[in-house]
Amino acid sequence: MRIEKISLSISNAFLVHDKKKILVDCGCPGDWDFLKSQLAAMGTNLKSLAAVVLTHVHFDHCGCAAFLQAEGVPVIASEKAIEPLSKGEQEGKSLLSAADSLPFLGKFLRDKNPGKFPPSHIDYSVAETLDLSEFGIEGEVVATPGHTSASVSVLLANRSALVGDLVMGGILGLPPAWKPNFHPISSNNTQALRQIMTMRDSGFVHFHVGHGDTLAARH
């Protein structure tokens, strides 16, 4: 099993190689051409993707879902993401309104946020867990609310966890990007931390995050 990071405009996506390949998260709508070129450079045709997993419904993580779906790639996400994804709207409280008390972050997000993103539907919804073996991946998608109520994580047999924004490296990936940090805009950081600690105590040793570098469990 192998995991390759794709650094997009403001977030990370991940290509997971096993018997088949899946993509975890897919960036902003404006990342589409770059995402396609990066996948091609990795030797991956869109038609060869078994699925795309959306860790949550924020524009910088699910913005290209509709484009992938149009290419025949099934979408996996929390059952709680069905409504916002179908409307092309952010899940829960608006990132922009939540960022009002953080002037720099608020301006950064306002510059990047498209307002809405192309809507899509969920082909495989996650209530609690979803076994990925039918997608050629030894692992599962698990509901891990904390950053948002519809957050999910991908837990792989190699003891790596792809956790979206439950935790981040640095502040939105800024140095030191290897140092774990709370996401500055999160619905429940206490719950998010509890999810990470549970994974660590279950033996997961690497956390692949939506912003920043891969984090080691020892931190």
Image: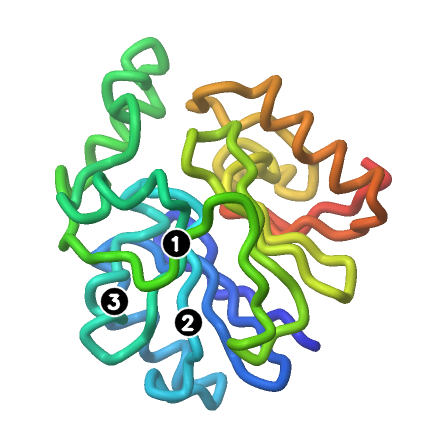
Sequence-first tag of 3 and 2: 3
Q: Amino acid at mark 1?
A: Ser
Residue depicted at x 52% and y 28%:
146
Is residue 121 rendered to the left or right of residue 128? left
Q: Secondary structure at mark 1?
A: strand
Indicate the quadrant containing the C terminus: top left, top right, bottom left or bottom right: top right
Residue depicted at x 45% and y 24%:
186
User: Which residue bears the numbered disc 3?
Assistant: 32
Which of the numbered marks, if any, corresponds to residue 51?
2
> What crowding class fits label 2: few (fewer than 14 Cα within 10 Å), some (14-19), or many (20 or more)?
many
Q: Secondary structure at mark 3?
A: helix
Sequence-first tag of 1 and 2: 2
Q: Amino acid at mark 2?
A: Ala
Which of the numbered marks, if any, corresponds to residue 125?
1
Is residue 157 rendered to the left or right of residue 114? right
Q: Nearer the viewer, mark 1 or mark 2?
A: 1
Does the residue at mark 3 contact the one at mark 2 (Cβ under 8 Å)?
A: no
Q: Position of residue 107 (x, y in %)?
A: 25, 26
In this picture, is 1 found above or below 19?
A: above
